[in-house]
Amino acid sequence: MSAAVTTKTKEPFLRIAKREGLNPWKAWGIRGIALICALLLCALFVFALTKLNPLDVYSSMAKGAFGTTRRIWITLQDTAILLCVALGLAPAFKMKFWNIGGEGQILVGGITTAACMIYLGDLLPLWLNIIIMVVASSLSGALWGLIPALFKAKWNTNETLFTLMMNYIAIQLTAFFVSKWENPFGSNSVGIINPDTKGGWLPEIGSNRMVSPYVLPVAIVLILTVCMFFYLRNSKHGYEISIVGDSENTARYAGMNVKKIVLRTMLISGGICGIAGFINVAGASHTISTNIAGGRGFTAIIVAWLAKFNAFVMIFVSLLLIFLEKGASQIASDHGLNNEASEIMKGIILFFVLASEFFINYRLIFRKKDKKEA
Amino acid sequence: MKKIFALLLVLCMATALLVGCGGGDTDGGKLKIGAILIGDENEGYTFAHIKGIKDAVKALGEDKIEVIWKYTVGEDEKAYNAAIDLVEQGCTYIFSNSYGHQSHMLKAAQENPEVNFVAVTGDTAKTANLDNFSNAFNDTYESRYVSGVVAGMKIKELVEGNKLTDKNYRDGKVKIGYVGAFPYAEVVSGYTAFYLGIKSVYADVVMDVSYTNSWFSIPDEGAAAEAFIADGCVIISQHADSTGAPSAVQAKNKEGTVVYCVGYNIDMLAVAPDAALTSATNDWSVYYTYAIGQALKGEKIATNWAKGYSDGAVGITALGTACAAGTAEKVAEVEAALKNGTLKVFDLNTFTAQAADGVKVDANGKVTEYLADIDGDFTGETNVVKDGYIDESNADEFRSAPYFALRIDGIVEHMKSES
């Protein structure tokens, strides 16, 4: 230390150093502090601009997401659908394959599901139709994911741009089918499919009307979550994905067929996004429109990254995001704070949660005051 | 694992707040009204509805009515969820303001027969045949006709003052451009009324209509307006909700091009102070005062409701400085005639059409029969021609939503390719 002092280099006021092996409890504490800071800043923002009691606003948010039995279940269902997309994107992103095409993969899955509901809904028994819908929607989503992967493997095209552009094709395709199936004619919307017969709708579980329609979507995604967790952590495939993600050359050196892994992973990734489209159309909205993906293909990227591809952590990240969304519409309803205001609050909270990762991974070192230059 | 704890903490805090602040819902026997809105007060169309409901509540007694608002509700299962949530909060009358909410409102209505649902601007209440499901629409075509009269006065002034060049004419007729959203009856009915309004003042006009395939797109509407201006159109009007077209017209007007615009829903003078003549607009408080008033009395809301000038439900916004001299007097005269019923917008003597499926014309091209699609099955089945005029939006006999989809001579539609 004394040797270092003799050099004339000035120590910067602030240095950033990588942190190694931070105690989990400390990391937990940092996240907690970040969240409290975010809530305090939001409170300040709300009070400064609107003079509303921030506690009232927070209680509105909680009520919006969990205020009634039905609200709780709708929150859970929306969480499940977002989570499902994130589960699809996680293996691709873990492999460092930038699948920005979740949106399109959801849409094509939705289109095939809607087609099954419209053409087969009243024809086949429900269980058979559901099997067909699951297979068809995951195949179409998988195809949508496979195309950019094939081009990547064959001609090394840029998958970020390719998957993104596939979204626009999917949107146009959806618009085409919406105008083909529009009902009533001229409305440019499909309306609810089979409203009377409920042909092709995911069945309701139980007799409580406030719960029954939401059980199956949530259950399907929970099963998928468990599968994805173990697939990524314990399977040979999962191991290969993480090696390709860390270094393609290492993977190649270890004798892995990188192209095959990329293609296979994108099949799975697109397939699960397609299933998200199926759950959305057959389980939740019972209609198809260009907005059924509703930006989930992008939001799910945040979910997957924030959770560092841990499927169980993703549950909580998606729940947080959906909670903020539901809370936002409730504060608009209760306090007349419009969507812009709630978007700002959502932004503040996400910013702090993301920023806390920085303080978990890095450490700030301030220049010591007593250090005087010779 | 650590992250799980962090997020659990969020939930705990949220739940704590929930528990801490519960039990605040007390209603002193107030009538609870639910409003499901496609946008919020920042969007002209929804703003008009919010204002309508608030004015109605003010008129009927704020102490008797509580309104629960649901803003920016999409046209998907969110509309159904919002409706059910309002039912669970104790609302007995629920209104939605966008066409796409309709099928979700209908589903909620079927499941909750004790609650009344109104899909405003919807068109299936007649066929749905439920006691608790209604539609309502203003006779906007009347105000479009009046805004056409304003535009016609301007064209007359420009022609008489020799302000137009060859570019502004096609076959000796002055060119007009109209930016439509979708080729639906609502839009067709509106632009035809606008065109007939112009023709009532200055007969030698032709109109081009293009579609943006969106209700709200500033860039698309702006681009469509610019294309019309480049083609030499003198008046640009719109049936889409953004300020894209008026802004484009204002910019060209500033550069010295002879072009003016007629807006929709909101006063466009803020974005086009030199170019805006007026806007056709709705006063939704008339309907909401009626409907909420019925609710207070415990009486049924009409399954179909459509009113226009006679009840003050439609009108035009303040006239711009660019308007021709004498416009205000002419407008007053036309409005009075619409109010007392002596003037019919779709008077069969004022236009001609070509014979087609469901359209019969005589040797002079005058329409003798027009089959409109009232039941929403793709084809016209109901003759809506009545002694000398087409009976648009007859809520008692047919339905409140527009069904005039007849293409008349002098208007050319430019269909955008499927998108």
Image (cartoon, rainbow, N blue to C red):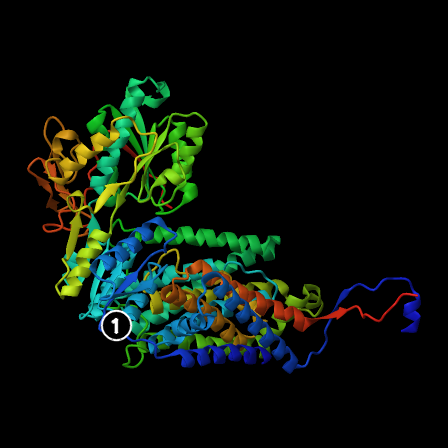
Q: Chain of mark 1?
A: B
Residue A227 appears in the picture as rendered: yes
Q: Position of residue B195 (x, y in %)?
A: 24, 33
Front-most of residues A49 and A367: A49
| B1 horizontally vs A115: left or right | right
Task: Give, as a three-letter code, the residue at label 1.
Answer: Gly
Q: Based on the displayed image, in which of its 4 quarters is residue B36 positioned?
A: bottom left
> How many labels sit on residues?
1
Front-most of residues A205 and B221: B221
| B65 horizontally vs B251: left or right | left
Q: Which residue: 63% across, 70% down?
A: A357
* Kind of element beneath mark 1: loop
Q: Position of residue B15 (x, y in %)?
A: 44, 80
Q: Residue lying furthest left in this view?
A: B387
Query: Height in image: B416 above or below A50?
Result: above
Residue B132 appears in the picture as rendered: no
Q: Position of residue A47 (x, y in %)?
A: 48, 65
Q: Residues within 10 Å of mark 1 (few under 14, many from 20)?
A: some
Q: Based on the displayed image, in which of its 4 quarters is residue B244 positioned?
A: top left
Query: Height in image: A353 above or below A183?
Result: below
Q: Position of residue B206 (x, y in %)?
A: 27, 27
Image quadrant containing the N terminus of chain B: bottom right
| B61 horizontally vs A236: left or right | left
Q: Based on the displayed image, in which of its 4 quarters is residue A293 positioned?
A: bottom left
Which residue is disc 1 drawn over? B90
Query: Height in image: A184 above or below B70?
Result: above
Front-most of residues B386 and B330: B330
